[in-house]
């Protein structure tokens, strides 16, 4: 499972052409990091359910 809080592998400059994340992905990751831990589990279960469809 990916560790969403691990910032070591994510570039800080999301504007370059070689950036690992798009601006939308970066915005989503920033939002996710601000979500309380209890809600992260709920989000994860929903994402896993949708991925299984």
Image (cartoon, rainbow, N blue to C red):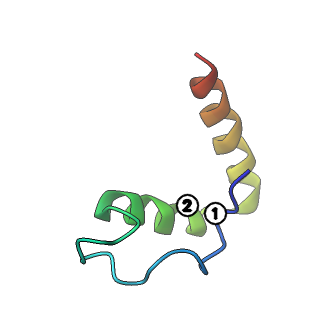
Nearest the camera: 36 or 4? 4
Callout 2 environment at 10 Å: few (<14), some (14 to 19), or many (20+)?
Answer: some
Using residue 44 as the reference point, say whether residue 10 is left or right of it: left
Nearest the camera: 22 or 47? 22
Q: Residue at x 30, y 64 (%)?
A: 23
Q: Going from the N terminus, do you reach mark 1 or mark 2 first?
A: 1
Which circle marks residue 4 in the picture?
A: 1
Discs 1/2, front: 1
Using residue 37 as the reference point, say whether residue 49 is left or right of it: left
SS under mark 1: loop
Q: Are marks 1 and 2 in contact (CB under 8 Å)?
A: yes
Q: Residue at x 76, y 54 (%)?
A: 38
Residue 41 in the image, given as x and y percentages of width and height: 74, 47
- Which quarter of the rendered picture does the C terminus lie within? top right
Dividing the picture into quarters, in which one does residue 26 lie? bottom left
Relative to 28, say whether 5 is above or below.
Answer: below
Q: Residue at x 69, y 51 (%)?
A: 39
Q: CA distance from mark 1 to mark 2?
A: 8 Å
Relative to 5, say whether 24 is above or below.
Answer: above
Q: Which residue is mark 2?
A: 32
Using residue 12 as the reference point, say whether residue 52 is left or right of it: right
Nearest the camera: 36 or 18? 18
Dividing the picture into quarters, in which one does residue 49 lie? top right
Relative to 39, say whether 29 is above or below.
Answer: below
């Amino acid at each position: 499972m990916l560790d969403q809080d691990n910032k070591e592998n994510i570039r800080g400059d999301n504007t370059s052409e070689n950036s690992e994340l798009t601006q939308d992905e970066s915005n989503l990751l920033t939002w996710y990091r601000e979500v309380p831990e209890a809600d992260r589990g709920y989000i994860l279960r929903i994402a896993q359910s949708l991925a299984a469809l």
